[in-house]
Image: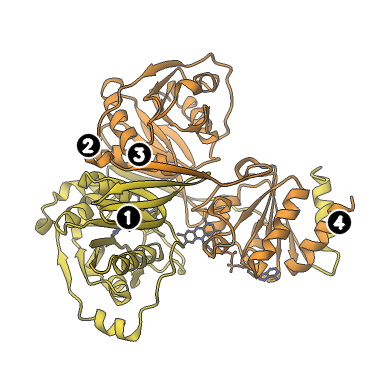
Amino acid sequence: MSVETILVFGEGDEGSPSGLTLELLAAARGLATNVEVFVAGDGAAMAAELGAHGATRVHTTGPLDGKLMGVHAAAALQAHMETSSPDAVFFGQTPDGRDTAARLAVRINQPVVTNNVGASFEDGTLVVEEPVFGGTQNVFTAFKNDGPALAMFRPKSFEAEATGGGEAEVVAVDAVDPGPAGSASVTGRHVEERSGPQLDDAEVVVSGGRGLGQPEAFEMIDELAGLLDAASGASRAIVDAGWVPYSKQVGQTGKVVKPNVYLACGISGATQHLVGMKGSKHIIAINKDPEAPIFGVADLGIVGDVHKVVPALIEAMKSR
Amino acid sequence: MKVVVCVKQIPDPALPGELDPSTNYLKRDDKLILDESDSYGVEMALQLVEAAGGGEVSLVSMAANGEVSGLRTALAMGAEDAVLVSDDALAGSDALGTARVLGAAISRMSPDLVLAGVESSDGYTGTVPEMIAGVLEMPSITFAKQIEVDGTTVKVQRQTEAGYDDVECQIPVLVSVTAGVVEPRYPSFKGIMAAKKKPVEELDLAALGVDAAVVGQSGARQETVRVTAAEERQAGEVIEDEGDAHDKIVEFLGELKIV
Ligand SMILES: Cc1cc2nc3c(=O)[nH]c(=O)nc-3n(C[C@H](O)[C@H](O)[C@H](O)COP(=O)(O)OP(=O)(O)OC[C@H]3O[C@@H](n4cnc5c(N)ncnc54)[C@H](O)[C@@H]3O)c2cc1C
Ligand SMILES: Cc1cc2nc3c(=O)[nH]c(=O)nc-3n(C[C@H](O)[C@H](O)[C@H](O)COP(=O)(O)OP(=O)(O)OC[C@H]3O[C@@H](n4cnc5c(N)ncnc54)[C@H](O)[C@@H]3O)c2cc1C
């Protein structure tokens, strides 16, 4: 069964929608006859790609000029929804997605259900699926509210797919002044240097954890990643310790990755780490403790010292 | 400077979590502890007040059965006093209901700065802080990895997917802090003893003037319809490294045509 319209909260950078936005479009297309996008930013620049992924319209505020997004997006979104009444709004579980959904929830007095990986309609109500306890159980939640269903989804929960649709119609929406609540402004942006494939869409991910022993040892993780054309990732233990930036964190509070191969080096396999990488097609783990939980999900487990196995692997790769 | 820190008291995350099969709420039978996610907010508040040359750090928490053990930990770290909201009608509250309650409590405290964690360790919706700001109609900056207060201006490094943004705002403002941004201090023995005598004001919904209809299970307007076991991943081969494990890995990658 399907509903009339699902609105996707679209995010992106420099004119291209994020991968997560395209994933949400794919999910929404399976559930609604009409899928539209709301962009708090330059949505016009994304219209072609959004259309190719099945969006009929993109409602856009235009650039926010340094305003912090959430509260402004929510105010404009509320005004838009008063005339368009979508059955559901899908958000990505991102910083701006959360801020916008949370502010909107207060403004329109509707609940938000977060951290979902699946959605369906059962007897006309949206039911969303959330993994709990490190992905060992799935909780299915039905919206019982009188009004639009606000649902937030984790990355990599759906497969993005172009449908070959034409450019989405661009509809300008008016900015709405949220008053003093909207006074936070962005005064500078800092982008970390990145080379090689992105963690979210790399074919191979090589990750390191506390078992590396010291920050310098992460260099061998980066070196191995370079040789395998892989992205390097990390457990939260070494992100919190300041060895590597947060952008490398895999897990519940970091990135969700689903590469072809995930190679975990000196990572114990805590449930919060597993939820971020358990969906990988193949998992290899190197850990000196034969009881480490990571071996429970590994296709190939090596009980050994990362300081021996990883350098030997680097040498083997170099000599090929 | 007056700082109010939101602290959640949660079941110990080291213990396996369990849903009550009759209600599908998270079981909260054991003693609750201070959520580690909030120990960073408490530490940050103490450091900001020290840097400002004076002020006060107060705590606010919503928890069942008048639970204060997590609050005592934060008081032992150095916070001055606390407000606890506890009421039987709150069982099953969602994030929005929680934010309405915490917002009502905070509005009585007139803070310059409200701190919270980016997301809790047990529910981790990551929406409560921004919702509290919404209830208070206050500006907010989420995902802070560094905070500096310069007179009446709050300057924050806000974590983004690509790196971080510099964000500025005038007080009063709510800021949510990411884990690991500061090293939370261990309460000293003296701190623990002093915490026992620090004031904790306990309020119920009536005292706060919050309508019981907007909280609890009915206020949440969302219902768990079923809980299923997730498909388990099968463990594969585990071998002991005898100096040749790297060859095994190369072979495995070769079969997948990665090398
Ligand atoms: C709310 C919440 C959210 C969280 N979110 C995340 C998240 O997003 N991502 C995440 O990763 N974690 C997250 N965590 C933390 C998680 O619970 C673990 O603490 C963390 O994943 C542990 O990291 P680790 O495996 O590197 O370290 P440890 O658990 O300390 O494991 C180190 C491993 O290295 C092995 N080892 C040691 N020396 C060697 C050696 N020489 N050679 C080989 N192996 C060796 C050890 O046997 C051990 O298994 C979260 C926790 C909470 C409470
Ligand atoms: C597995 C699970 C899934 C859930 N999913 C949803 C959902 O999708 N939608 C929904 O509306 N509710 C959901 N809930 C209920 C929700 O967790 C509770 O409403 C909870 O009271 C607040 O949300 P949170 O823990 O997610 O807070 P978060 O927003 O993750 O917490 C961030 C910060 O807000 C502050 N804070 C949060 N709660 C309190 C408190 N009680 N006292 C003081 N400070 C606090 C703390 O500083 C905390 O670090 C879920 C609960 C569980 C156990």
Q: Are marks 4 and 1 on the same chain?
A: no
Q: Are marks 1 and 3 on the same chain?
A: no
Secondary structure state at the residue bearing disc 1: loop
Q: Is residue A293 visible?
A: yes
Image coordinates of residue B18 in percent, x first then y, are 42, 61
Residue ranking furthest to the right: A319
Secondary structure state at the residue bearing disc 2: helix
- Rounded to the nearest angstrom, the CA distance separating label 3 from label 4 is 49 Å
**Which chain's colour is yellow?**
B
Name the residue at 28% across, 39% down: A182
- Rounded to the nearest angstrom, the CA distance separating label 1 from label 3 is 33 Å
- Rounded to the nearest angstrom, the CA distance separating label 2 from label 1 is 41 Å
Image coordinates of residue B91 in percent, x first then y, are 25, 57
Q: What mark, if any, has residue A70 been given in the picture?
A: 3
Image coordinates of residue A307 in percent, x first then y, are 75, 68
Q: Which of marks 2 and 3 precedes in the sequence?
A: 3
Q: Specify few, some or many for label 1: CA neighbours under 10 Å numbering under 14, 14-19, or 20 or more.
A: few
* Ligand 2 under 8 Å from disc 3 Cβ: no
Please name the colour scheme applied to the rendered image.
by chain
Q: What amino acid does circle 2 point to?
A: Gly
The chain that hosts pointer 3 is A
Q: What mark, if any, has residue A316 been given in the picture?
A: 4
- Rounded to the nearest angstrom, the CA distance separating label 4 from label 1 is 55 Å
Q: What mark, if any, has residue B23 been given in the picture?
A: 1
- Rounded to the nearest angstrom, the CA distance separating label 2 from label 4 is 61 Å
Tell me: A215 left or right of B223: right
Q: Is residue B200 above or below residue A39?
A: below
Q: What amino acid does circle 1 point to?
A: Thr
